[in-house]
Image (cartoon, rainbow, N blue to C red):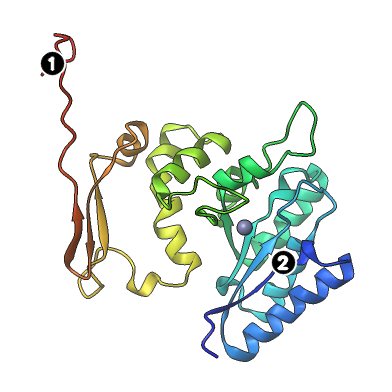
Amino acid sequence: MGADLVGAIPHFEFTREDGVKSVHKAFELAVKYDKMVDIHCDETDDDQSRFLEVLAAEAYRTGIAERATASHTCAMHSYNNAYAYKLFKLLGLSKINFISCPTENIHLQGRFDAYPKRRGLTRVKELTEAGMNVCFAQDSMSDPWYPVGSGNLMYVLDAGMHIAQMMSIEELENALDFITVKGARTLNILDRYGVEEGKPANFIVLNAKSGFEAICNRVSVACSVRNGEFLFERAPEVITTDNPLLKG
Ligand SMILES: [Zn+2]
């Protein structure tokens, strides 16, 4: 009927077995119709929620891992390290993509905790360091789960870098990758993504000289170009002050 991809939400099924079946079904359909798979996976603080291993194994066996995505995987935050060590081997083999939604996850997870409260974000730093493709996204605009979504990925990135504790110079320099090329790779659109001759002229311009400066100064978008035309341009902010230290 024209669907782009197959989804599932295994941790919402009645039983562990039902959840496993739903992941298998999603991959069966994806292979049959040659579509991508995006599983809303383990968005819970329950350390026993382990559908990611099912997803990764299925992606590995079917050979469509690069077109498969595990979204959220919040339970990974709470996995014991012995299990996470074993899991990372499978994840590395499978080469699936990850989407983390830092603003939603920090708001929604940890709700059943007294203090100390868990952050509930998946292991963005560790997955990235292990060479896996992790990107940041926002999956709520204004809904009961998260009322203050704006779709501005610069806010999402800012939150993500804080919550995932990624503040080295190198991490900050490469931070924009989380909302650009890594997202494009997850969406399987690298063939038409990026500033290169022959690709669609779709891009934004940030008021910064480097990735680090863009993050550090929380810069705004100077302009957005869609198919070679300005979607909008933003005039530089003008600040008026009598304070001599702030002038010039
Ligand atoms: Zn969601």
Compare residues 15 and 161 and report the one nearer the observer.
15
Tell me the SS state at disc 1: loop
Compare residues 178 and 88 and report the one nearer the observer.
178
From the image, tell me which residue sits under label 2.
9
Q: Which residue appears at 68% of the width and 54% of the height?
A: 73
Q: Which residue appears at 40% of the width and 59% of the height?
A: 181
Quarter of the figure with the N terminus: bottom right
Tell me the SS state at disc 2: loop
Q: Which residue appears at 55% of the width and 49% of the height?
A: 128
Residue 54 picture location, percent across and down: 77, 68
Q: Residues within 10 Å of mark 1 (few under 14, many from 20)?
A: few
Residue 247 circle label? 1
Compare residues 103 and 128 and report the one nearer the observer.
103
Q: Quadrant of residue 18?
A: bottom right
- Residue 3 placement, left or right of 29: left
Question: Does any portion of residue 224 appear in the rendered image?
Answer: yes
Q: Is residue 65 above or below residue 128?
A: below
Q: Quadrant of residue 91?
A: bottom right
Q: Which residue appears at 54% of the width and 47% of the height?
A: 147
* Amino acid type of the residue that numbered disc 1 sits on in the rendered structure: Lys
View quadrant of ligand 1:
bottom right
Residue 238 picture location, percent across and down: 15, 30
